[in-house]
Image: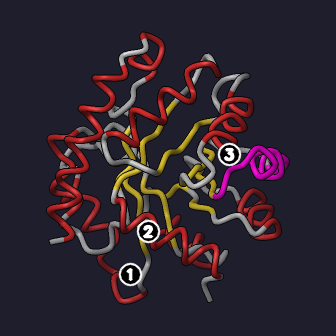
């Protein structure tokens, strides 16, 4: 059964429809980045653990924006679960399926989406009790059609997915039409380069563009 934090996270995913996936090199950019995303309508972000400053950036965001949906991405080791939890993350995401990391997240009460790309991985995740899965990488040839073919045998189970990895605005609509897609993950919205350059206007415009599509899905 989905716990209350898990259900709240799932509801937030479906309501917003998109998660901005970001890499922050300089923690000083954290607040301005979130301001730009919020101005564009996105209140969910996945801050990846790919830089030494990731945890500090996470702490700054949580302090400045206590109500935002803040996730930790690229969670690869069990000990990182407590680190991101302490830094203010309220969900975690990984590119792959590591049972030890899943168990650590469950023990900590941290909603977590492991990465899957095949029927076997989906079934392994189900055995571990996971109900929200990151489909990664999503931007393969055929894109949404391949995704639909892989998840079709499990449609009756109510699994929810976050397609992520190489997606762009041009393919977003096809994924958003799929009922089992809780939200899209997008690194194009606030790319590492845009953040480094402090191009907050471009980030806000990208966020607004994808938000317009998610609003159309909800109508």
- Residue at the (36%, 53%) spot, across then down: 18
Callout 2: helix, strand or loop?
A: helix
- Residue named by callout 2: 119
Reading the image, the residue beneath label 3 is 75
Density class for disc 2 (Cα within 10 Å; few <14, some 14-19, many ≥20) is: some
Percent position (x, y) of residue 207?
A: 30, 39
Q: Earlier in the sequence, mark 2 or mark 1?
A: 2
**Segment tinted magenta in the rendering:** 78-90
**Helix, strand or loop at disc 3?**
loop
Q: Are marks 2 and 1 in contact (CB under 8 Å)?
A: yes
Q: How crowded is the residue under tag 1: few (<14 C-alpha within 10 Å), some, or many (20+)?
A: few
Instruction: Report the Cα–Cα distance between label 2 and label 3.
Output: 22 Å
Q: Is residue 32 magenta?
A: no
Find out whether residue 84 is within the magenta segment: yes
Label 1 secondary element: helix
- Total label count? 3
Res. 25 image quadrant = top right
Relative vertical location of residue 59 with respect to residue 51 in this rendering, above or below: below
Quadrant in the picture for residue 92: bottom right
Judge from the rendering whether residue 43 lies leftward or rightward of residue 199; answer left or right. right
Q: As rendered, which of 218 and 68 lies closer to the eye?
A: 68
Q: Nearer the viewer, mark 3 or mark 1?
A: 3
């Amino acid at each position: 059964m989905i716990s209350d934090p898990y259900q709240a996270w799932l509801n937030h995913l479906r309501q917003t429809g998109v998660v901005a996936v970001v890499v922050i090199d300089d923690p000083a950019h954290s607040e301005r980045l979130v301001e730009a995303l919020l101005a564009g309508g996105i209140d969910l972000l996945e801050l990846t653990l790919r830089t030494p400053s990731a945890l500090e950036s996470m702490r700054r965001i949580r302090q400045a924006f206590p109500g935002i949906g803040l996730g930790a991405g690229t969670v690869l080791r069990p000990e990182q679960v407590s680190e991101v939890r302490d830094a203010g993350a309220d969900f975690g995401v990984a590119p792959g399926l590591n049972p030890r990391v899943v168990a650590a997240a469950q023990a900590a009460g941290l909603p977590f989406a492991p990465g899957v790309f095949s029927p076997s991985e989906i079934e392994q995740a189900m055995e571990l009790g996971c109900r929200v899965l990151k489909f990664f990488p999503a931007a393969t040839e055929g894109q949404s059609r391949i995704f639909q073919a892989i998840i079709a045998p499990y449609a009756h189970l109510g699994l929810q997915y976050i397609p992520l990895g190489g997606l762009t605005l041009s393919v977003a609509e096809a994924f958003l039409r799929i009922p089992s897609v809780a939200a899209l993950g997008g690194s194009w919205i606030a790319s590492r380069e845009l953040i480094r350059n402090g191009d907050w206007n471009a980030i806000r415009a990208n966020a607004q563009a994808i938000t317009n599509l998610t609003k159309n899905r909800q109508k």
